[in-house]
Image (cartoon, rainbow, N blue to C red):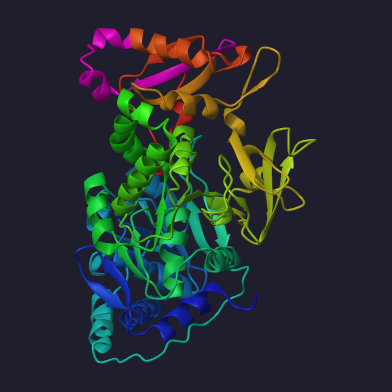
Amino acid sequence: MNKSLIKYIEQAINSNLNKKALSDYQGRTLTYMETAQQINNLHSVFKKMNIKHGDKIALIGKNSLNWAIVYLSAITYGAVIVPVLPDFHSADVIHILNHSDSVFLFASVNHFEQIDETQIPNINIVLSLEDFSILYTKKKNTETVINKIKESSLNTTLNEVNFKDYPLDNLTSLVYTSGTTGYSKGVMLSLNSLTQNFIYAKNNMPLKSGDNILSFLPLAHAYGCSFEFIFPFCIGCHITFLNKIPSPKIIVKAFSEIKPQLVLSVPLVIEKVYFAQVKPIISTTKMQILLQTPIISKIIKKKINAKLTDAFGGNFHEIVIGGAAMNIEVEDFFTSIGFKFTIGYGMTECGPLITYCPWNKRTPHTCGKVVHSLQIKIDSPDQENIVGEILVKGANVMNGYYKNPEASNEALDDEGWLHTGDLGIVDKEGFVYIKGRKKNMLLGPSGQNIYPEEIEAKLNSMKYIMESLVLEDNGKIVALIYPDYAEINNDNYSEKDIEKILEKKRNEINTQLPDYSKIMRVKLVPQEFEKTPTKKIKRFLYNY
């Protein structure tokens, strides 16, 4: 590799000057030329505010055109971008701003209103993410400087950009995880990690200049940032940011209008579509009979596929699903109808991609094959048959956790292997099967490995169950269950019936489980499980 991500950004701008680059949904649009002008303006602000190479610039707010401009401006300037998930509690945001040593902050007004500036002593200036106006500053004449830069930019015509490049091992992004097991850690991603993620996507995912993308995953998360923003921007695509709460109604409307060529999603979105719109139809007795008739079944599945495809705009090459495990029932049904989806695997510590495979080459229940810039191995005597921890090594892997050598040494061994904490196997063809998290694994009475995620997937596929959490209590396997109250009410059951329903479900699922992993007790949870900003259950908060 002889070119960094910075040069790919530069190339994208110079090759697509008059094409649409960034849009806010139902808002303004910038061309690649106008985007470059905005980047140059912020570079001038950084310079006047004495921001140096390697300084940390933090960024918090909803997905937006301006969010993207700040990100591009920071990394092409040689600063370190610190994207903060907007769903973080204000105390966590303050911790991240201080721990990261950020000196400059871009924040939406409503987020900054929740922060006491006296608690972030290292921050010298805060600009509004809505219009880059000054929200807070310690520096004199800041307003005069920024106004002069804005005025001078009005008369500037830009025909080409030439950004200074930096070494590939340069720290470029500091991403704080939304860990399900405790306090977030700052993942140090190099310019090389971001570049390799882009190169793999460019060579393996179907996008070309001028294609449309709808960005609705959180940009402060590595998955959304890399594949709904950086990758399509560097290809020359037109990216529209859904800067509203992505409710199913709004997402469907946006997809129908934008008709994206590539869709990125988390399992939750796809699963909601299946359980709300598909399963009620195919679960009827009449439909079950028809689905057993080969010719009629084929026609029905073709129609369902067409309707699902239309729901996502009808124009995509494939849907790439990642960020969490997918419900097996949903995966199997979508595979059976020929729906164009694939499942990848990654983690923030790899910026994020680890495995991927195109939809028409994938193997069911796998998450693809390892990407070109990584090696993978299973820490077990027989990686094809005996589950072990997934280890990866290569250019995508983080530099470590910021100011946390203990956690860095625990994650990265002396040979450079990243211990992912995920358990799995790899088959002869290189397809990776993930079984669960190492920290979540339970032991059966005779030392058998029990993967709670696999049991939870079965429970969550059952009628009347919205979500579940499988735990160990005094050597017994137990389950916390949050019921699907809407479905229970639709079938005219009362709250008094819920415990009987759950007990029936416990007996039902135990017929599908080996003796050592059978669920001995279930307990009703009155409200949804508390989750991280990336919608993973905070398991550490719960016990039976």
Q: Nearer the viewer, residue 226 or 140?
A: 226
* Residue drawn at point x = 69 percent, y = 49 percent: 430
Residue 425: give x, y in percent of width and height. 68, 39
Query: Can residue 91 be seen in this snapshot?
Result: no
Number of marks in the rendered image: 0
Identify the residue shown where x is 40% and y is 10%: 504
Give the vertical position of 359 relative to 518 (above or below).
below
Residue 8 position (above or below residue 492): below
Q: Is residue 450 left or right of residue 385?
A: left
The residue positioned farthest toward the right in the image shown: 381
Task: Give left or right: position of 358 versus 447.
Answer: left
- Examine the rendered structure and indicate whether residue 11 appears above or below residue 173: below
Q: Nearer the viewer, residue 168 or 144?
A: 168
> Where residue 110 appears, x then y in whole percent?
23, 53
Q: What residue do we see at 24% from left, 12% from top?
A: 495
- Viewer-proximal residue among 43 and 301: 301
Q: Quadrant of residue 263?
A: bottom left
Is 448 part of what is drawn in magenta?
A: no
Q: Which residues are magenta?
A: 473-499
Task: Look at the image and tell me in which quarter the N terminus lies.
Answer: bottom right
Does the stretch in magenta take in 480?
A: yes
Image location (x, y in percent) of residue 80: 49, 66
In this rendering, would 231 be left or right of 346?
left
In-front residue for pair 415/106: 415
Residue 138 placement (x, y as % from top left): 31, 66
Along the horizontal axis of the image, is 485 left or right of 373? Answer: left
Q: Is residue 97 visible?
A: yes
> Residue, x 63% and y 58% (percent of image)?
371
